[in-house]
Image (cartoon, rainbow, N blue to C red):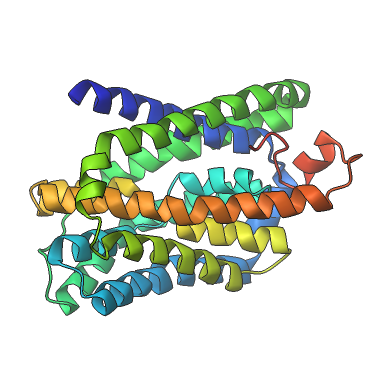
Amino acid sequence: MDTLHLVLNAVTVIFIAATMFTAGLGATTPALRAVFSDIPLLLLALITNMAVVPLLGWGIAALFGLPSSAFIALVLVASSPGGPFGAKLAMVQKGNVVAGAAMQVLLASIGSLTFAPTANAILGAAHVGANVSLDVGALVRTVALLQLVPFAIGLLMRRYATPTAQSWLPKAAAVSNVTFLVVLAGMLLGNWRDVVALFGSLALLAGFLLAALSFATGTLLATGSTARRTTMGGVASVRNAGPALAAIGLAFADQPAVLGALAAVLLSGLAAALPIATILSGWRSASTPPSQSTGEAITRGQTPSAP
């Protein structure tokens, strides 16, 4: 299993970098500027991901009366915004990929600073768990290396080498798609025992419900077109596993029960978010004129190569 974990970690790194690089290749400076100049959108996204979703996690855990391990896992996941699957969900649903990728990087960066205080506040108020202490600098460097740098490289290529960027876009999207499937399969294969062990408990339902409610909340608390709203919903629904895993290692001594619950919450969350994104993709495909060109899709901040 150690070999499997090493391979899965390597593929996950490729998936994150390829997804962000693809988003950068499809982005334009005006589209990116439109996202970051929309103050209401930024404020609503921050409120949703930094406050509402963590409170949803706490509320669901308390409502379901989850055992301490699952309670901790759900709160850690809910407190950690900016998951790299956010940009991928934007591609899957044929949403606003530029807005999704930009918001994902922003949330992951800010979340590196807010994760520990948020998780500590909730776990302390609920009288569950231990004090969470993390290396904030390491988290910020990880976000920069795996998410911000590939996105910036793709964006620069799009601006200064547009023909090359357009020719690379389908290939980069294909790498993102294939590694995405490998990561999903690896997560299931590597954690199936933990997931099966939680059958009959409410942990799987809690993770599913958190993702579904976060998707709805992120969509409602957003501005702009329907595509951009649902993209913000997708970004809110998938959380950043990195800080949560680090917290389990540092504050909870890699307790198997907490790790297993974390895997179950993450997988059940994807099981909620992916079908929603797929349904949205089907609706948009049915309403998109066949004559729409790839160039038009890229200009709107979408990628035409989404699965």
Residue at 22% of width from left, 20% of height from top?
A: 3
Front-most of residues 244 and 149: 244
What residue lies at 55% left-to-right and 43% top-to-bottom?
88
User: Vertical placement of 242 versus 153: above or below?
Assistant: below
x and y percentages locating residue 224 in the rendered image: 71, 66
Judged left or right of residue 31, residue 188 is: left
The answer to which of 20 and 205 lies nearer the viewer is 205
Query: Horizontally, is 95 left or right of 274 in the view?
Result: right
**Corner quadrant of residue 81:** bottom left
> Which residue is located at x 23 percent, y 73 percent?
122
Residue 28 placed where, x, y %? 72, 41
Give the image location of residue 99, x and y in percent.
63, 52
Which quarter shows the N terminus? Answer: top left
Above/below status of 183 relative to 225: above
| 60, above or below 160, in the image | below
Report whether 89 appears left or right of 61: right
User: Which residue appears at 57% of the width and 30% of the height?
Assistant: 153
Inspect this view and state whether residue 65 appears. Answer: yes
Residue 74 appears left or right of 91: left
In the rendered image, the residue lying farthest to the front is 200
